């Protein structure tokens, strides 16, 4: 079982990670006003405003960069949701329990990944 002081230490780490993730996402994505947990990557504009996009290579570069941004957004957004879920669990006194079996997640695992949802035995299973 995790101690109260460890729980507060992990809460602080989660809050810092939430800030970092939000800042990273804000750099290339916009929060959905209808669903604040959802972010939408902005399409990159590689040309000067008002100029026509006639260069096929430039268009291809924009599409490629946008695909990369979408993948990055999905990864960061997923991690942010895990961090938010962990913070909610701390507030509800349900933090540190495996979502699959209900057993305590080892403290070492929580220190390595404060947003862990599963113990090691269940971490590789489909959620």
Image (cartoon, rainbow, N blue to C red):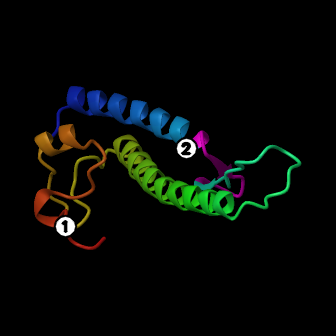
- The answer to whether residue 81 is visible is yes
Instruction: State which region is magenta.
Output: 26-37
For label 1, the crowd category at 10 Å Cα-Cα, with few meaning under 14, some 14 to 19 and many 20 or more, is few
Place of residue 32 in the rendered image (x, y in percent of width and height, measured from the top left): 68, 54
Residue 124 got which mark? 1
Report how many numbered discs are placed on residues in the image.
Answer: 2
Place of residue 118 in the rendered image (x, y in percent of width and height, measured from the top left): 22, 58
Residue, x 19% and y 67% (percent of image)? 124
Eyeballing the image, is 48 above or below 35?
Answer: above
Residue 77 got which mark? none
For label 2, the crowd category at 10 Å Cα-Cα, with few meaning under 14, some 14 to 19 and many 20 or more, is many
Helix, strand or loop status at disc 2 = helix
Tell me which label, 2 or 1, sits earlier in the chain. 2
Residue 25 got which mark? 2
Place of residue 23 in the rendered image (x, y in percent of width and height, measured from the top left): 54, 35
Which residue is nearer to you in this view: 74 or 111?
Answer: 74
């Amino acid at each position: 079982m995790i101690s109260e002081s460890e729980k507060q230490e992990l809460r602080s780490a989660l809050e810092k990670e939430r800030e970092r993730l939000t800042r990273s996402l804000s750099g290339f994505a916009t929060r959905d006003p209808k669903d604040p947990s959802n972010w939408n990557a902005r399409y990159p504009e590689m040309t000067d405003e008002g100029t026509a996009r006639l260069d096929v290579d430039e268009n291809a570069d924009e599409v490629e960069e946008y695909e990369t941004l979408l993948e990055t957004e999905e990864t960061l957004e997923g991690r942010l949701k895990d961090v938010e879920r962990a913070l909610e669990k701390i507030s509800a006194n349900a933090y540190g329990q495996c979502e699959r079996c209900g057993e305590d997640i080892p403290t070492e695992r929580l220190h390595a990944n404060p947003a862990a949802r599963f113990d090691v035995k269940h971490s590789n299973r489909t959620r």
